[in-house]
Image: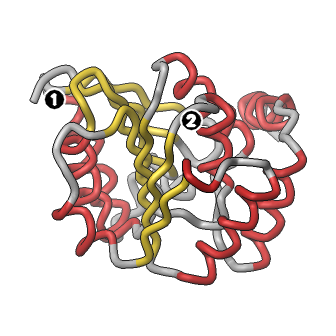
Amino acid sequence: MSKQELSWKYAEDFVDEPAAIRTARAHSLELGIDPVSPAVGAQLAVLAAAATVHSILEIGTGAGVSGLWMLTGAPEATLTSIDIEYDHQQAARTAFADANVPANRIRLITGSAQEVLPRMNDGAYDLVLVDADAGSVLDHVQHGLRMARRGGLVLVAHALWKGRVADPAQRDQTVADFRALLGTVQESGAVLSALSVAGDGLLQLVKVSD
């Protein structure tokens, strides 16, 4: 194992994941969901806390791992989460209840993000997390930036896509979409951007203009 790989492992092992999130992670894996890693989850919590987040939109509920991490950082926030898989959302609902998150702070929308997002309001959220359907990541981020308030966060999980984005030999469509996204935000004056290599990558955007 290289020194870089040892550092990545150390960063993951450094995180003391709460019991409710560990349980949600186990359920995610049973359902075949690839949740954010503990190190990425901890970053979500820190970012949510630092930005004093009150309203969160999550594109891709999964079994609740990322939602629980964001609520760890913003315990008074409300979470709206979209997922096309009803069974996944039921697992997430159980995870939120087990973590004692009040039901009135959780809104789960079952449906295709491509159908739901166009109907949602501009500038309504402090934080938007994109973690669903990698093939639609460009559209989801575009909607995320529209729905985030000025100064709000748009975060993109799995932004390095299984280590393939950094490998020039990989040229499939999903990799091309992530590269296009990274190139676009790098050149945009509408956002500040940073790319973390924790887990499978976390792209962090702050919306500085409309």
Residue 9 place in picture, x, y as percent: 81, 37
* Disc 1 residue type (three-letter): Glu
Above or below, 75 against 60 in this view is above
- The answer to whether 107 appears left or right of 14 in the picture is left
Q: Quadrant of the N terminus?
A: top right
Q: Quadrant of residue 140?
A: bottom left
Above or below, 108 against 195 in this view is below
Judging depth in this view, the residue of 191 and 112 nearest the camera is 112
SS at badge 1: helix
Q: Quadrant of residue 16?
A: top right
Callout 2: few (<14), some (14-19), or many (20+) C-alpha neighbours within 10 Å? Answer: some
Q: Quadrant of residue 148?
A: top left
For image coordinates 35% across by 66% down, the residue present is: 174
Above or below, 141 against 2 in this view is below
Judging depth in this view, the residue of 14 and 101 nearest the camera is 101
* Disc 2 residue type (three-letter): Val
Which residue, given by chain and number where applicable, does mark 1 sit on?
A: 187
Residue 56 place in picture, x, y as percent: 44, 42
Residue 117 place in picture, x, y as percent: 25, 62
Above or below, 176 against 45 in this view is below
- The answer to whether 3 appears left or right of 89 in the picture is right
Q: Is residue 43 visible?
A: no
Residue 134 place in picture, x, y as percent: 40, 65
Q: Is residue 157 visible?
A: yes
Q: Quadrant of the C terminus?
A: top left
The label number, if any, that marks residue 197 in the structure image: 2
Q: Of callouts 2 and 1, which one flags the residue occurring earlier in the amino acid sequence? A: 1
Name, please, the residue furthest toward the top: 50
Distance from Cα at disc 2 to Cα at disc 1: 20 Å
- The answer to whether 60 appears left or right of 121 in the picture is right
